[in-house]
Amino acid sequence: MSTNTKAIRSSGWKTDMMIGFPDGVLLLLFTTQVLYSKSLTVQAFYIIHFLVIGFATLLMMIAVFRANRGDEEDGTMSPEEKEKLEKLDISDNTIAHIADEMQKDQQVWEKTLEEEAVELRSYGTLHALRSMIATGVFFFLGSCVVFLPYLVQEDFPAASRTSLTVSLLLLLVFALLKSKITGQGSVRMALRYLLTGGAVVLVSYMISSFI
């Protein structure tokens, strides 16, 4: 069994929640805002979103499991990779530039892990499965809470306003909770997630206007 440590591995339910919940909220906020005003039957609207929630939850779980497996690479250019580039007749300056950019990306990545208080742990199948399931559950809950107003009332414009309000409140509460868990500034964290939610709504409105 692999014991490498170069992977983003869950350090518990808090990490699983921080990964899964906001993505579920933002995804369903996007799809519902794009589709609620379109000429879809209520049943078609429901079926589309049931499929979106199901497939997206599955993809999230697969991605988390793969992230927990990790790999042996450290994010920088290996001698083997450099040799392959040289065989492609790429100039030394270009190869050096690529290596430098990979190094910068690795430094940014490591800084992000430190800021988000994500631990790197050795691989374990049971741990990976538990993290996969927990993250999927949090993702599913986040998406369902956003979608719930559309199930409660079939007046989709009214449901959209309720869903939007609930989504932004959830993102605000989540941001405050995350700031407490990670020790980051609550104001900065709240602004980050509110701006992200606002950007999702803006993009969904623009896309909805063209389809």
Image: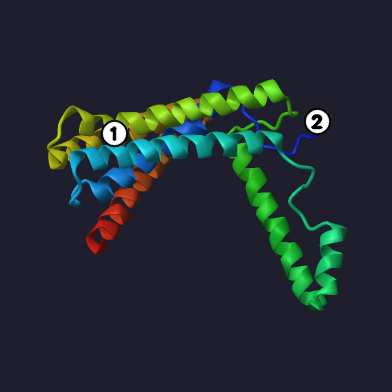
Q: How crowded is mark 1: few (under 14 residues within 10 Å), some or many (20 or more)?
A: many
Q: Can residue 73 be seen in this view?
A: yes
Between 18 and 20, the one nearer to me in the picture = 20
Residue 48: x percent and y percent?
A: 32, 42
Kind of residue sitting beneath label 2: Thr
> Disc 2 on helix, strand or loop?
loop
Q: Name the residue under label 2.
A: 3
Kind of residue sitting beneath label 1: Phe
Work out whether 80 lies above or below 114.
Answer: below
User: Which circle's residue, 2 or 1, is located before the other in the chain?
Assistant: 2
Residue at (80%, 30%) from the top-left corner?
3
Q: In which quarter of the image is the N terminus?
A: top right
Work out whether 83 lies above or below 199.
Answer: below
Q: State which quadrant residue 29 falls in.
A: top left
Q: Name the residue under label 1.
A: 147
- Horizontal side of 108 relative to 173 (left or right) equals right
Q: State which quadrant residue 174 falls in.
A: top left
Marks 2 and 1, how far apart at CA? 40 Å
Residue 121, numbered circle: none
Residue 27: x percent and y percent?
A: 38, 42
Between 56 and 146, the one nearer to me in the picture = 56
Task: Say which of marks 2 and 1 sits in front.
Answer: 1
- Horizontal side of 96 relative to 116 (left or right) equals right
Residue at (39%, 27%) from the top-left corner?
141
Q: Is residue 190 visible?
A: no
Between 14 and 179, the one nearer to me in the picture = 14
Residue at (26%, 61%) from the top-left corner?
211
Residue 88: x percent and y percent?
A: 80, 75
Work out whether 31 lies above or below 57.
Answer: below
Residue 192: x percent and y percent?
A: 41, 44
> Disc 1 on helix, strand or loop?
helix
